[in-house]
């Protein structure tokens, strides 16, 4: 791997709920995660809903401030904490780290025409010198994301567009500032299955031409496998990364019990094979509460192989067979 | 060097053209597509014309004519005459002189204060938000019209010269609080929307986020409130006039109602035209404003338009 573009070091995010009346409770959405993403690299972050993957994405983009730990960005030949960046450097970071959000229906201002979503960033970073040029560039962007003729879309309001079109516009907006790093937060999960591959291929094509790196957040292992083929995948469970490594290796030979269960949920088209498949027997289907996670390994209440040590000691991420796994079994 | 002024001129013309297209022509088209809004607009335009131009055609003669008291409608007096035999139509036409400017000015002052305070409170948040909401809540508990009466009397006593702007400020004294509270609530929810996060992520300025992302979303609400507070300003203003708490010249709508009450008392019998004329005048204007507000809502809210 080349030098990482952006890295998270022991980053945690704690949300407080309640207060006012009753006891204040704390939710550790992200719990001491280490992550590195190099230039033009893809890391697919997979986990079930509520495991903190979106929060981690927002921490990487400095949209949320970490409770502890840091996210640092490689700028002017050194790593700097994104929350300590000021002025010009912060602007450069903001420009280079972009988000493709989950819900296409709310990512565009419902009161503004498509064109007025696309031009402000172009003018802000002086990519376009004036409105006219910005409009021309916006047209090119819409062509890139497959909306043509672009002029037809400029004067339309988001409420007159379909989910797929809106998501394309959101992508156009994100790539308009030529970012080096994009967090795609469940970018295709709200779209029709028929549109997903198209959008995924669009994102992959953008990566080729702009040399962007992706943190691709999804709950769907099949999509992660498609998007991050020949790249890396990270499995997240209740705020921790439990397994991280090359996509094919993890899919073919999952080591962490949680990864194994996740893989077991991916449907197999061939019924004969599906019947033969052995599912790891979970001890409990219940996801432990984030407010009071179980001591030790957070998966121990459900893990079929749990031993006594799992209830006492938090497993560290360690290298096993060329990948990182956080489990006492290895 | 020679071509610079030429270029400039082209730019200004282009700007003017796009302004005309987006801020005048398009809204008018949207208004025209809604019959009720069109009716409202016609009513409001009619009133504005009546107040602005009408008095040039219909002279106001306030000299009493004993022999013509309480006449019904006729060609000479389309709306009849009052207790002193004076033409009612002329009084109506001339009596609206202050009402419309006061109404619109009040609407403007109300939304200016309400929006500024509401957005500040909702967007900045924290302790400032707490302080402002407490302040708003205190204002909301004060009953509006009695406070207006007190302030109006105090104004009369204080010797401050009373002009339209002062009256507008007084009338919006209680109206802004409700607006500020609902704007704040809307900003609180809009602030969490994905498109605000996207704007933040793109590094767009706070100014841009407040004025170009949040404000347009609150705009339909503000526009409606402009209309509604204008409507209630008409009520309050004529009410204060009718009660004699705001100095008035004879022949305003409020004064007419006041006189009608004093001299006629009921709407039966000979004086009914004198009571009904100013009342209906006010009601029709308000209906017009409410209808128009529906169209205004459509102008600011693309989701309401059908295509």
Image (spheres, coloured by chain):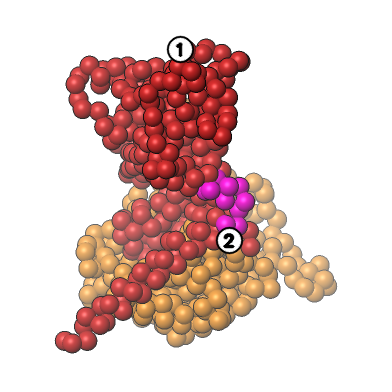
Chain colours: A orange, B red
User: Relative to residue A77, is residue B280 drawn left or right?
Assistant: right
Neighbours of disc 1 within 10 Å: few (<14), some (14-19), many (20+): few
Image spot of residue B193 (x, y percent)? 47, 53
- The answer to whether one can see residue B21 in this image is yes
Question: In what element is the residue under mark 1?
Answer: helix
For the C terminus of chain B, the image quarter is: bottom right
The residue most toward the right is A272
Q: How many marks?
A: 2
Q: CA distance from mark 1 to mark 2?
A: 56 Å
Residue that appears at 31% across and 79% down = B10
- The residue that disc 1 covers is B262
Residue interval drawn in magenta: B32-42
- As drawn, A145 above or below B239: below
Q: Are marks 1 and 2 on the same chain?
A: no
- Mark number for residue A159? 2
Residue that appears at 33% across and 25% down = B249
Residue that appears at 55% across and 81% down = A149
The residue most toward the front is B67
Could you tell me what secondary structure mostly forms the magenta stretch? helix
Image spot of residue B8 (x, y percent)? 25, 78
């Amino acid at each position: 791997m080349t030098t990482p573009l952006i890295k998270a070091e022991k980053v945690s995010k704690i949300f407080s709920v309640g207060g006012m009346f009753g006891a204040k409770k704390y939710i550790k959405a992200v719990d001491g995660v280490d992550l590195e993403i190099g230039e033009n690299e893809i890391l697919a972050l997979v986990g079930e809903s509520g495991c903190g993957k979106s929060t981690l994405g927002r921490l990487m983009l400095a949209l949320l401030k970490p409770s502890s730990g840091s996210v640092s960005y490689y700028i002017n030949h050194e790593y700097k904490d994104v929350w300590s960046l000021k002025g010009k450097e912060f602007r450069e970071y903001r420009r280079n780290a972009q988000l493709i959000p989950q819900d296409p229906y709310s990512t565009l201002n419902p009161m503004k025409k498509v064109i007025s979503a696309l031009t402000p960033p172009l003018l802000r970073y002086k990519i376009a010198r004036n409105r006219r040029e910005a409009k021309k560039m916006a047209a090119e962007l819409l062509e890139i994301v497959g909306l043509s003729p672009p002029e037809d879309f400029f004067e339309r309001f988001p409420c007159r567009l379909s989910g797929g079109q809106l998501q394309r516009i959101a992508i156009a907006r994100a790539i308009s500032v030529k970012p080096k790093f994009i967090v795609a937060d469940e970018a295709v999960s709200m779209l029709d299955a028929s549109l997903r591959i198209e959008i995924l291929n669009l994102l992959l094509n953008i990566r080729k031409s702009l040399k962007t790196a992706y943190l691709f957040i999804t709950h769907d292992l099949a999509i992660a496998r498609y998007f991050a083929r020949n790249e890396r995948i990270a499995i997240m469970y209740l705020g921790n990364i439990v397994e991280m490594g090359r996509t094919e290796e993890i899919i073919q030979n999952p080591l962490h019990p949680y990864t194994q269960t996740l893989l077991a949920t991916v449907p197999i088209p061939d019924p004969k094979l599906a019947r033969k498949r052995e599912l790891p027997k979970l001890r409990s289907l219940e996801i432990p509460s984030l407010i009071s996670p179980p001591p030790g390994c957070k998966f121990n209440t459900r893990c079929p192989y749990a031993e006594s040590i799992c209830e006492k000691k938090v497993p560290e991420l360690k290298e096993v067979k060329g990948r990182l796994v956080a489990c006492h079994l290895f | 060097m020679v071509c610079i002024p030429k270029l400039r001129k082209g730019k200004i013309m282009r700007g003017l053209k796009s302004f005309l297209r987006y801020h005048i022509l398009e809204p008018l088209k949207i208004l025209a597509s809604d019959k009720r809004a069109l009716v409202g607009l016609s009513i409001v335009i009619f009133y504005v014309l009546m107040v602005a131009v009408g008095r040039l055609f219909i002279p106001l003669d306030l000299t009493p004519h004993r022999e013509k008291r309480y006449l019904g409608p006729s060609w000479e007096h389309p709306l009849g005459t009052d207790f002193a035999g004076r033409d009612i139509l002329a009084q109506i036409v001339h009596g609206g002189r202050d009402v419309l400017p006061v109404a619109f000015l009040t609407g403007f002052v109300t939304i200016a204060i309400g929006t500024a305070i509401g957005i500040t409170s909702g967007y900045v948040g924290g302790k400032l938000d707490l302080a402002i909401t407490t302040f708003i809540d205190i204002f909301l508990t004060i009953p509006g019209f009695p406070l207006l009466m007190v302030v109006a009397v105090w104004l009369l006593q204080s010797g401050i010269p009373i002009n339209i702007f002062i009256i507008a400020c007084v009338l919006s004294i209680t109206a802004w609080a409700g607006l500020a509270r609902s704007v704040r609530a809307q900003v609180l929810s809009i602030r969490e929307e994905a498109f605000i996060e996207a704007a933040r992520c793109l590094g767009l300025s706070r100014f841009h986020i407040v004025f170009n992302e949040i404000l347009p979303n609150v705009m339909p609400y503000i526009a409606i409130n402009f209309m509604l507070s204008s409507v209630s300003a008409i009520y309050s203003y004529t009410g204060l006039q009718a009660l004699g708490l705001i100095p008035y010249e004879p022949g305003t709508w409020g004064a007419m109602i006041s006189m009608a009450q004093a001299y006629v008392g009921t709407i039966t019998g000979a004086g009914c035209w004198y009571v009904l004329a100013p009342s209906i005048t006010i009601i029709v204007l308000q209906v017009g404003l409410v209808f128009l507000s529906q169209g205004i809502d459509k102008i600011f809210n693309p989701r309401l338009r059908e295509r």
